[in-house]
Image: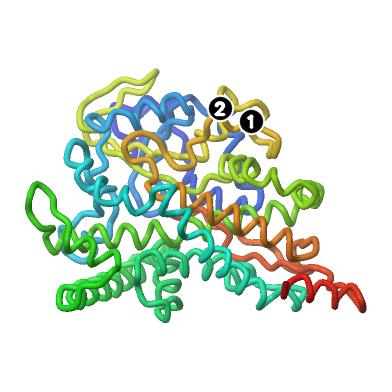
Amino acid sequence: MSHDPAVPAHIPPHLVRNIDIWAELTAQNENAYAWAAELHNTTPPIFWIPRLSFLPGTWVPRRAEDLRRILQDPETFSSVGLTPYAMLLGESWRLAPLEIDPPEHGKYRALLNPLFTPKKVEALEQDIRTLANQLIDAVVEQGSCDFNEAFAKPFPTLIFLTLMGWPLEDRPLFQHWTQTLIKSFDIQVVTDNAQAITTWIRTHIAERRANPGDDFTSYLLRSEIDGRPLTDDEMLGINFLIFIAGLDTVTSCLGLFFRHLARNPEQQAQLRAHPEQIGDAVEELLRSYSIVNMRRTVTKDVQIGEATMKKGDFVLISTELANLDPEVFDAAATVDLQRNAAAAPHMAFSYGVHRCVGSHLARRELRIAMELWLQRLPPFRVADGSTPKFNAFGVFGMEELELQWDLPTGAAASSTKAAVSA
């Protein structure tokens, strides 16, 4: 049998699966995570696919154990140069610390850690609640909403801009850029948006150089690495990374979580009756609906199980496959809000040195959003006649989600309004 020219010679045919995982997940729509869970029954522990959207072929480890091993070995599995933004612009800056390997990685990570400590996040609690309540105020008496536009996009964006000390009036611009940068399949659209974002960030850096303030960019301008100020490229790369990471991930989680609650009224009722369980529910929903995929480049030949990975090969790090691994989680494809998250920790925030620096903030935002929606709105469901639309390109999430709920009538309505204003 002749070897497929699209498959490198070192990859045995029995490990090849001719599927574009992101395209297939998108086509599966609301069945996407069930389809991903089924890969654990139908594929080898590590398989190879010839394409991933417009990206080249890659190894796909599906077991959490193998994924943890890879994430703990940045020397063999490098993060350098794995996002296209600088390259598309013909530039050479890096998304720091995401695209930097240890030991250099730690120097950049140390700049970000103080911004996202539990204490810092605690200090934002009231702002987060206020913003959530304001957005709920705008829809609570409408009986329905486009969940993404009404809540999932503006909520984390406003919190992020508050945290960064960036202008709140630029929220619509930021939301537009984030969606088109991360979700678009069109290279020209991605390039144009990357250009617009870098221009905005560079302009903002120049303004803060001239007029330092109490914001994130001014903090970076005062910071040093190895006893020197950050270069312009370092400033740009860090700001760009925080921009992407701070905006789209929570938006995507919110869409998936609220779609699940809308489709599972008994679990929604359970959390309404027991709001103290919402923290655990957030962990189980993070596990069940993980959204982040990363890639690594193999720096030297390495063997994992049957897979002989050669220098230069790509490896897909799929948090959803790790978190749907039946070797780690009983009934992994089932959303069990009573599951003990401590017994088998999920990898939704990745693992190893690149573990998500903003995880404390993300958890807080998700918990408060669920608390206030369940406290302030009647039971909600997917709007009649609408079909939620899932997108698995880049950061997984709900592209369309219309929700509706029954408005109380008469005396009940006025007592609800009184409770809200109180």
Name the residue tied to disc 1.
340
Above or below, comparing residue 401 to residue 61 in the picture: below
| Residue type highlighted by circle 2 | Ala
Above or below, comparing residue 389 to residue 198 in the picture: above
The local crowd at label 2, few if under 14, some if 14 to 19, many if 20 or more residues have their Cα within 10 Å, is: few
Q: Is residue 356 left or right of residue 347?
A: left
Above or below, comparing residue 76 to residue 229 in the picture: above
Q: CA distance from mark 2 to mark 1?
A: 7 Å
Rendering coords of residue 418 (x, y %) = 79, 75
Q: Is residue 366 left or right of residue 395?
A: right
| Residue type highlighted by circle 1 | Asn
Name the foreground residue: 57 vs 106: 106
Name the foreground residue: 223 vs 86: 223
Name the residue tied to disc 2.
344
- Any mark on residue 218, and which? none
Are the residues tagged 2 and 1 within 8 Å (C-beta)? yes
- Give the quadrant of the C terminus: bottom right
